[in-house]
Image (cartoon, rainbow, N blue to C red):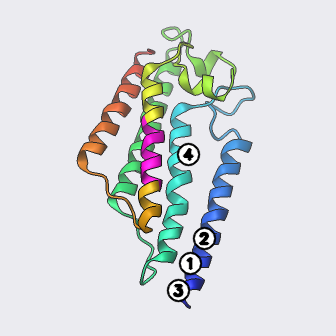
Amino acid sequence: MSEDVYSAISIIIAILVFLAILIVGWRTDLLKEGNMAGKPYSFNKFQLWLWTLVICPIFSLYWGNVTGHHPDINLTGLVLLGISGGTTAAAQIINNSQKANPADNPLLKSLTVQTTGFWADILKDDTGQLSIARLQQLIFTFVYIGIYLTMFFQKMEYPIFDSNAYILMGISTGTYLISKGLNK
């Protein structure tokens, strides 16, 4: 196949994958705390969904636009998906622990609160208060996504973040998880 065919196929795949992830995220309960109607949106599920929405189409575009057309992903993409996946898993462990002791957590959002709207849900902690840790994590996520996309589309190459960028994201993620565990 010619380079143009690979490129066209990768663009079609990227668009289809992007749309599928987008539609599933917005049209289902995938991004909510639990599966009952009216439950609030989940911050950590939203963050993992965002990184999936970004990295999966980029993976396809990279495949179609590099010589040799070998499917490949670099350490930056893996670390970003790993951090958001780990955050989601750790947050679920915290949720399960808190649900196991509802007397100790009477204000647990996922047990008692109905959705108050997407942005309010993801920025409020489990006591219903706006959370600076969630805001910080959300801002860093959007900044990192913007940088990742800009760097990729400038050269059609995977961006390479340095270790301090990962440390910053880890600090922000750790702050979010600790505050979640403390219901702050």
Q: Which residues are magenta?
A: 140-149
Figure quadrant of the C terminus: top left
- The amino acid beneath tag 1 is Ser
- The amino acid beneath tag 4 is Trp
The location of residue 49, given as percent across then percent down, is 56, 45
Mark 3–mark 1 distance (CA, rounded to whole Å): 6 Å
Earlier along the polypeptide chain: callout 4 or callout 1?
A: 1
Mark 1 highlights which residue? 7
Give me the disc on residue 64: none
Mark 1–mark 2 distance (CA, rounded to whole Å): 6 Å
Judged from the image, the secondary structure of the residue bearing numbered disc 2 is helix
Give me the disc on residue 3: 3
Q: Look at the image and tell me whether residue 89 can be seen.
A: no
Figure quadrant of the N terminus: bottom right
Mark 4 highlights which residue? 49
Judged from the image, the secondary structure of the residue bearing numbered disc 3 is helix
Relative to residue 27, is residue 144 drawn left or right? left
Look at 42% across and 23% down and name the residue there. Answer: 133
The one of 96 and 78 positioned closer to us in this rendering: 78
Give yes or no for contact between labels 3 and 1 (Cβ–Cβ under 8 Å).
Answer: yes
Relative to residue 127, is residue 133 drawn left or right? left
Earlier along the polypeptide chain: callout 2 or callout 3?
A: 3
Give me the disc on residue 11: 2
